[in-house]
């Protein structure tokens, strides 16, 4: 791989997945279809407003799909598209690195 | 991998590498030892102040090492530590995903 010139496609990806909370949201959705409140449950520190914003962004770039089921009450679920699912390699690489390099002592907030 | 519970170590990593510019800086340093201005050359839109801040953060978490060579004028170079170099798997996964999924039309800013 050529690290000596910046790649515009790489920059686009970093702009998308490097945003605050996005790396966490995608990890949750790799577990399968989720409702808004299911995502919140795994990322409780994130505000509703922020999650709404991020989901719209991820939908706009074709990483997340929103499904509306016309039940009573209406059920809305989010899942990863094919494009989104293929981010698994990125998320798994981050997870592996974390397990090797992040020390437990740094987890105390 | 268990995507049904959030991993605190993963969260720590996202906090570090998910920051604006950091994903680009690490990619540049995978090319080898670099001076401040070499990094800037590949990421011209980033301000000096921002690069300085990011390098201090990356040094603090042990991803980047700063080397001062007492020449005239003094030469300062940055490179990745062992911990930093092992982020190659993450950066390469992002690059691969980008090449598959980022369309050229989205590159026009």
Image (spheres, coloured by chain):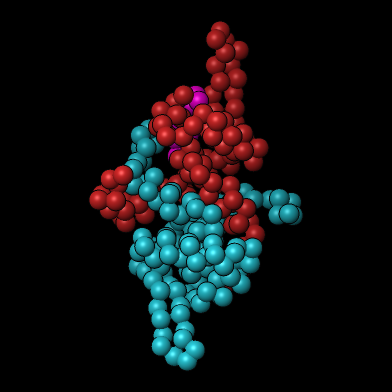
Chain colours: A red, B cyan
Number of numbered discs present? Answer: 0
Relative to A101, is A1 above or below?
Answer: below
Relative to A105, is A55 above or below?
Answer: above
Residue at left offset 51%, top offset 77%: B35
- Is B70 or B28 nearer to us in this picture? B70
Position of B9 compared to B20: left or right?
left
Q: Give the position of the C terminus of chain B as an image quadrant.
A: bottom right
Residue at left offset 55%, top offset 10%: A73
> Which residue occupies the extreme left position in the image?
A105
> Which residue occupies the extreme bottom position in the image?
B72
Image x and y of residue B23, in percent: 51, 58
Relative to B101, is B4 above or below?
Answer: above
Image x and y of residue A66, in percent: 59, 27
Does B62 appear in magenta?
no
- Is B44 or B87 nearer to us in this picture? B44
**Residue B103 in view, yes or no:** yes
Q: Main secondary structure of the magenta part?
A: loop
Hey, which quadrant is residue B5 in on the image?
A: top left
Relative to B80, is B11 above or below?
Answer: above
Magenta-tinted stretch: A27-36
Position of B85 compared to B99: left or right?
left
Q: Give the position of the N terminus of chain B as an image quadrant.
A: top left
């Amino acid at each position: 791989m050529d690290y000596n010139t910046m790649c515009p496609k790489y920059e686009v990806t970093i702009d998308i997945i490097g945003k605050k909370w996005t790396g966490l949201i995608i990890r949750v959705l790799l577990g399968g279809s989720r409702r808004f409140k299911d995502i919140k449950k795994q990322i409780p520190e994130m505000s509703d407003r922020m999650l709404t914003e991020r989901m719209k962004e991820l939908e706009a770039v074709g990483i997340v799909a929103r499904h509306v089921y016309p039940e009573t009450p209406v059920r809305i679920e989010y899942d990863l598209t094919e494009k989104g699912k293929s981010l698994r390699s990125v998320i798994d690489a981050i997870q592996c690195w974390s397990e090797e390099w992040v020390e437990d002592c740094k987890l105390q907030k």
